[in-house]
Amino acid sequence: MFSVKQQLLQPFFLFLALLSLVFIQGCEEKPTAPPQTPQYDIGYVTVATKTVELRDEMPGRTIASYQAEVRPQVGGIILRQLFEEGTMVQKGQPLYQIDPAPFQLLLDQARSDLNKASANLATARNRADRYRRLVREKAVSRQDYDDAVATYQEAQSNVASAKASVENAKINLNYTKVNTPIDGRAGRSSVTAGALVTANQSAPLVTVQTYNPMHVDLTASSTELLQFRRELAQGAFKRTETELGDIQLSLEDGTIYDQLGTVLFSDINIDETTGSFVLRVSFPNPQQILLPGMFVRASLPRGIVDNAILIPAKALTRTPKGDAQVSIIGQDNKVEVRTVKTERLINNQWLITQGLNVGEKVIVDGLQFVRSGAPVSKSHEVSTSKVNNPSK
């Protein structure tokens, strides 16, 4: 039988035995290998050059090619409206009828005055002819002859004045029919039958606008104009005058207008308050899709750049200072971060003017898994069209 002392020491010996067993097993285990860094498949595009057409986007407003504010040239009461609002009207078509009765009376009176003046002219002419014969025979004095000739000349002047009054009365009578001076669409009438109008009043009776063609006034800053001229002179791009007939238009809902426009003229002055100038473009509008006052954006050809370098927009990053950077697979398949200069974004691609060379590999996929100087063990080339159109 165990003694009391042995019973007390038994748990201690058991603990030593277990500790020795754990130590022996720990010595027999092999050392653990360090974790391996995961390898990612990096996608890149190869830098190449191509010919690129540069285009400028400019905002603008549509305006009617012709606009006439129709006003009466004589005063009177509107008897009736001769057109339907919102319909097409032809040049010379009557729009309103003003009461012609007062003007007809004035014409009749002018014709009566002309008949009276014509009768007086005949009497004065006969007297002057008779006195011409009598003065040769010294039957009348020279003074009487001179008075007869003056009366005849005055009668001629009265007839001419009466004829002018007749013509003026005819014109005023014709003005009682208010005609449109241009072809176009008539707007909302500001008067109705029974309204009193006055000659050359400030408020137009109706406005007629020509929608085909439709003009667009585009605005650009003087800074952009100076930059364009400087880059053109430096040979940054080339252009021809024929390109001015290839102007595209984007409507308010983002759709592209199906007709191309041509430049009519550019403003010769810079607006002092806004520092901008106006460029007017004409667009065919046979379906009258364009209406005056619409906000649009026009795409104008700026020029052609030969040997241009384009990279996908997703390949470019910015530093906190705003500098543009790209990551390339350099020598020994190591990542190199390169600072580049960009010109503009064209179809989701950056135009690079400095910092890249033909044949270099620009990383577009897996940028989050690379860092400068890190080796790239697995990579593949990505099609540029697939990068720009991922859905294809």
Image (cartoon, rainbow, N blue to C red):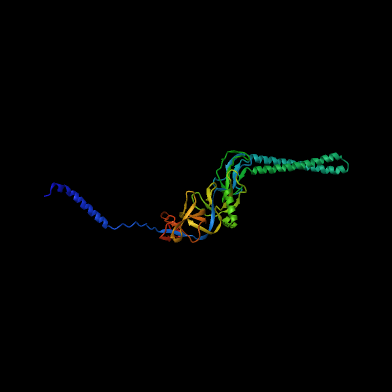
- Say left or right for 318 vs 274: left
Q: Is residue 129 above or below residue 300?
A: above
Residue 292 drawn at (x, y percent) = 55, 47
Residue 237 drawn at (x, y percent) = 57, 57
- Residue lying at the far right of the rendered structure: 138
Q: Nearer the viewer, residue 142 or 235?
A: 235
- Residue lying at the far top of the rendered structure: 196
- The quarter of the image holding the C terminus is bottom left
**Residue name at image x 59 percent, y 50 percent:** 226
Residue 112 drawn at (x, y percent) = 71, 41
- Say left or right for 356 vs 272: left
Quadrant in the picture for residue 371? bottom left
Q: Is residue 138 above or below residue 49?
A: above
Q: Nearer the viewer, residue 343 or 174?
A: 343
Whether residue 171 is visible, yes or no, is yes
Q: Nearer the viewer, residue 44 or 296?
A: 44
Quadrant in the picture for residue 118? top right
**Residue name at image x 26 percent, y 55 percent:** 26
Residue 278 drawn at (x, y percent) = 58, 48
Q: Nearer the viewer, residue 351 or 201?
A: 351
Whether residue 390 is visible, yes or no, is no
Numbered disc total = 0
